[in-house]
Amino acid sequence: MFADTARPSPELVSYRERMLLLAAAVFVVLNRVLLVLVRGDAWYSLWPVGVWLACTVGMHVVLNRVLPHRDPLITPLVMLLGGWGLTLVSRLAPPFEVRQTIWLAISVVALLAVVVLLPPHLRVLKRYRYTWLLAGVVLLAATLIFGVNPSGDAFAPRLWLGFRVIFFQPSEILKLLLIVFLASYLAEKREIIVTTRVKIGRWELPPPSYLAPMLLMWGFIMVLLIWQRDLGTASLFFLIFLAMLYVSTGQIGYVVGGLALLGAAGVVGYLLFDVVRLRVDTWINPWPEASDRAFQIVQSLLAFAAGGVFGRGVGLGAPTFIPVVHSDFVFAAIAEEWGLLGALGVVLCLAVLVLRALRAAISASRWPFHSLLAAGIGVSLGVQSLLIMAGVLKLAPLTGVTLPFVSYGGSSLLSSFIMIGLLLRITDAEAQASAAGGTLQESLNRNFMP
C-alpha cells in the first residue's frame, strides 16, 4: 500500500507532464511570434514551431502508452530547451533553421525508438559494451581519413563525416557509447576494483587486469581526439570518465589523481598546440587583443553586460557580432536578449535535468548498470553545460563544446535526445519495480539482472 501511495499514478504523471509541456509551449510560441514581429517576417515562417508542437504532442502521446511511470519533469525541460534553441538558431543563423528543425524531428524519433524498442533491462547495451564502443571508435577514426569541415576551411579541424549538405560528428555518439561502456564495465567490476588491491611500492592499487581494458579503450579515444585537435571533447570525455569512476567506487583519490593528470595535459597542450595556447591566453587576459585573437570572448562579455537583468528583447540585441554565436556562444546570445533572468532560466533547467538524472541513479541503485548509466547521463549533460557556460563567461578556458539541446548542431541534439530516451526508460522501470514491491522481486531480478 505504501508503494502505491508513494508513487504517482500514470494519470497523474501524464497530467503533470502535460501541464508543464503546455507552459513550455506558451514560452516557445510567444518568443517565436515576437521574433516574427520584430523582423517583419511572413507568418508562414512560424512553421518550425508547428514542427516543434507536433514533436511535443507526439512524444507525450507515445510516452503515455510506453512509459506510464516515467519522470514527468524530464520531457518538458528538454522540449523547452529544444524549442528555445530553434528560436535562437532562427535569430542567429537563419540559413541553418531548416536543418536544425529537421534534426529536432529526427532526434525525437530516435528518442521514441529507444523507449519503444529497448526492453527495461537494457541487456543489449550491457552485454555488447565492447561492440558498441568499438563501433564508435571506428567512426571517430574514420574522420582522420574521410573527415570534413562544414565551413570548407582547409586548415580547420575535420571532425565531421558527411555527404553534400548532411554532416555528422562521430564524437557525439561516441560520448554516449563511452558512458554505456563505463556503466556496464564498472557495474560488473566495481566490487573487485574497490576491494582488491595490489601493492606497488608504497601504493596499493586495483589489479591492472581489471583496470586495463577500461583504461586502454579510454586512452585510445583520447589519442584520437587529441590527434584531431578536438581538445574540448577530449576534456569532456576525461571528466566523464573521472566522475563515473568516482560514482562507482566512492574513492576521491581517483578524482584527485585524474585532475592532476588533466592539469599536466593542459600544460603539455599549451606548449604543443596553438589552439590551446590561444584559449588559455585569451582566458587569462583577453583585453590587449580584443580586436584580434580575443575578439570572440570580449564580444561575449559585452553581450552579457548589454543584456542586464531583463535583456534587450527578442531580436533587439546584437549577438551576431560574436563569431559562431549560434553554436559555441549561444549562451551569450541568451544573456543579451533575455537578460540575466533568461540565462539563469537556462541554468535552472539544465540543473534540474541533471538532478533528475542523479535522482534516477540513486533510485535505481538495486540495478548497478541502470544506476551508473543514469549517473553518467546526468554527469555528461552537467559537465558539458558547465564547460561551455564557464568558457563563455571567461570563468574557464573556452572548450568549444555545445550547450545541450540549445546550440546549433544536429549530432549533439541527436545524442542528447538518445540519452534522454535512456533516462526515461530507466525512471519508468525503476518506478514500476518500486510500485511492485517485494512480491514481485524474483520476477524483477529475472528482468533486470544479467
Image (tube, rainbow, N blue to C red):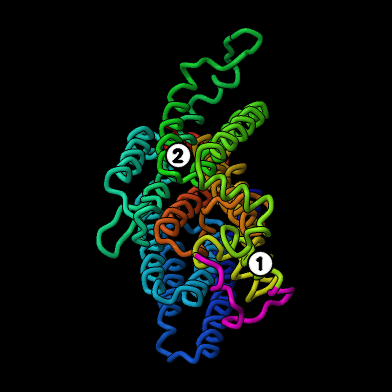
The reply, left or right, for residue 38 in relation to residue 117 is right
Mark 2 residue crowding within 10 angstroms, few (<14) / some (14–19) / many (20+): some
Region in magenta:
306-323
Q: Is residue 285 visible?
A: yes
Q: Do labels 1 and 2 touch, CB within 8 Å?
A: no
Residue pictured at 55% horizontal, 37% vertical: 271
Residue pictured at 55% horizontal, 40% vertical: 240
Which residue is label 2 attached to? 226
Position of residue 255 measured from the top left corner of the image (x, y, whole percent): 64, 32
Decide which of tag 1 and tag 2 comes sooner along the chain.
2
Position of residue 125 measured from the top left corner of the image (x, y, whole percent): 39, 39
Disc number for residue 343: 1
**Count of labels shown?**
2
Residue pictured at 45% horizontal, 38% vertical: 448
- The residue nearer to you, when weighing 295 against 28, is 295
Disc number for residue 52: none
From the image, state whether disc 1 or disc 2 is nearer to you.
2
Residue pictured at 38% horizontal, 65% vertical: 103
Name the secondary structure under disc 1.
Answer: helix
Is the stretch drawn in magenta largely helix, strand or loop? Answer: loop
- The residue nearer to you, when weighing 126 against 231, is 231
